[in-house]
Image (tube, helix red, strand yellow):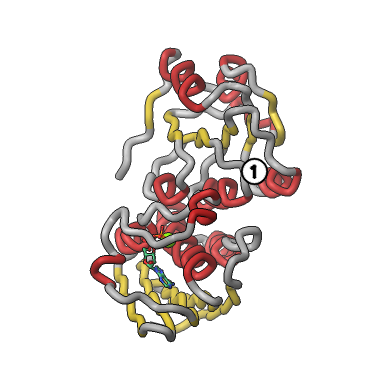
Amino acid sequence: MKLGKIKELLEAEVLCNEELLDYEAVSVFACDLMSDVLSLAKKETILLTGLTNIQAVRTAEMLDLRCIIFVRNKRPDESVIELAREKGICVLFTKYTMFTACGILYTNGLKGADMF
Amino acid sequence: MQELLSIKYDVESGDFIRGGEASSSIKKLLQQLGIKADIIKRICVACYEAEMNIVIHSLGGYIEAKIFNNKIEIVAKDKGPGIENIDLAMKEGYSTAPEYAREMGFGGGMGLPNMKKSCDEFYIESKIGEYTEVRMVVYF
Ligand SMILES: Nc1ncnc2c1ncn2[C@@H]1O[C@H](COP(=O)(O)OP(=O)(O)O)[C@@H](O)[C@H]1O
Ligand SMILES: [Mg+2]
């Protein structure tokens, strides 16, 4: 599913790297624990998280993830967005809570990322 | 087996803002060297977990990356409390991380297991009240 479609479904705001909205996401990993995220090594996964600090971006960077979606209306600091911009990670921001955001994406056909 | 280059980064205790910069720099370097993306990813996951352990659990230390033509060797060494029971620390889910580390997204007790899984070789050594040293090797 294209990030643009995900943005629409989650009524999300794009905080940086809007040009990535054409990127095709294959699966989603929803988590606030970065070590759990780090143990998934799959491509084309997007990260859905309530953790809005810089380590969420670092984690995405290490895994070459192209998109982070922050849930629960938690807007990250400008420094967090700045790092994501620099690393070529598209950041979306939605008012939905984690469970609801997951439900919306799952219902529309996105699946979870499998652990390796 | 010739050493091509070696680079060392200091890692500060408690610095959740800059924690990860060493791993990020190593990633950039490996990309410049043309190493395959999935290999880089494995190295970075291990290196980043090791770096964050220095931030969270120690009094500070360093990350050193030694690059050879066929492999990378990463040493993460710190001064600090050390690890009393390494077998226990290696267990998935075991963590003594403080609450604030959890709020920062760490402290799930998966760091050491992740490092071991991500690397071709993994060694850990520690002395109570003195240091912890993790050495990891990934072949290109
Ligand atoms: N560098 C270190 N210095 C002291 N203790 C450490 C260090 N690294 C790991 N440990 C100990 O091992 C435990 C497990 O580490 P890890 O698997 O990375 O999980 P976490 O960092 O989430 O607690 C830590 O909670 C801590 O007790
Ligand atoms: Mg850890």
Residue farthest to the right, as pictured: A78
Residue at the disc numbered 1:
A88
**Is A34 drawn above or below residue B11 in the view shown?**
above
Give whichever of B85, A92 is nearer the camera. Answer: B85
Q: Is mark 1 within 8 Å of ligand 2?
A: no
**Residue B17 in the figure: left or right of residue B27:** right
SS category of the residue bearing label 1: loop
Give whichever of B122, B106 is nearer the camera. Answer: B106
Residue B44 in picture, x, y percent from top left: 47, 59
Amino acid tagged 1: Gly
- Please tell me which residue is depicted at 47% across the width and 48% down the height of the picture: A34
Residue farthest to the left, as pictured: B87
**Residue A7 in the figure: left or right of residue B80:** right
Residue A110 in picture, x, y percent from top left: 42, 21
Residue farthest to the front, as pictured: B99
**Is B123 drawn above or below residue A13 in the view shown?**
below
Q: Quadrant of ligand 2?
A: bottom left
- Please tell me which residue is depicted at 44% across the width and 60% down the height of the picture: B97
Mark 1: give few (<14), some (14-19) or many (20+) Cα within 10 Å.
Answer: some
**Residue B131 in the figure: left or right of residue B93:** right
The count of marks equals 1
Q: Quadrant of the C terminus of chain A?
A: top left
**Is A96 drawn above or below residue B83 in the view shown?**
above
Please report, as a chain letter, where disc 1 is located: A
Residue B108 in picture, x, y percent from top left: 39, 52
- Please tell me which residue is depicted at 48% across the width and 59% down the height of the picture: B98
- Please tell me which residue is depicted at 64% across the width and 35% down the height of the picture: A91
Residue B75 in picture, x, y percent from top left: 44, 77
